[in-house]
Amino acid sequence: MSKKYVFELEFKVRDYECDLQGIVNNANYMHYLEHTRHEYLLTFGINFAALHEQGIDPVLARVNMAFKTSLRSRDEFISKLYVQKEGIRYVFHQDLFRKGDDKIILKATTDVVFLINGRLSEYEVFNQLFDSVSSQ
């Protein structure tokens, strides 16, 4: 794993994720990215349902995806990420690579902000997590 990436997760394309052209439908890439972020945060004990019950909601503010190569049914790939804090936003840099030839599939950035009791706010627990990961 490259030094900049702090987490990776393996996937395998399922038939129903493909469109009539035989490639992964673009909306499914959002699922791959989201699942990777959630699994990453679970490694720190951060659970979205539990946060919501406390009035804390991490929400997407922006997603930017650059499609480089298409995935097809049964392709295996790896989703990698690292995080940067920019003001009140957490920017997840997420890249997908096809297994076997390590070809880049997708480059994405996902901006996440926190609503606490409905108001845009800093989430101190996440700030501490970010500080501990970025200092490694």
Image: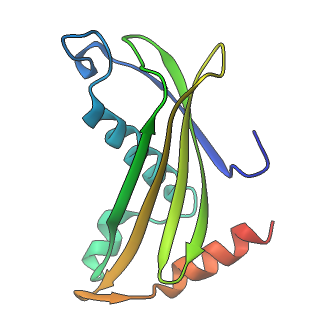
Does residue 3 appear left or right of residue 24 in this picture? right
Expressed as whole percent of the image width and height from the top left, the position of residue 51 reads: 34, 73
Which image quadrant: the C terminus? bottom right
> In the shown orientation, is residue 56 left or right of residue 123?
left
Residue drawn at x 29%, y 32% is 26
Q: Is residue 101 above or below residue 32?
A: above
Q: Is residue 21 above or below residue 27?
A: above
119 displayed left or right of 86: left
Q: Quadrant of residue 31?
A: top left
| 82 in relation to 132, above or below | above
Residue found 50% across the figure and 70% down from its top: 90
Q: Place residue 57 in its image quadrant.
A: bottom left
Where's residue 75, x and y in %?
46, 14
Q: Residue at x 24, y 10 (%)?
A: 21
User: From the viewer's perspective, is residue 43 above or below residue 125?
Assistant: above
Q: Nearer the viewer, residue 108 or 78?
A: 108
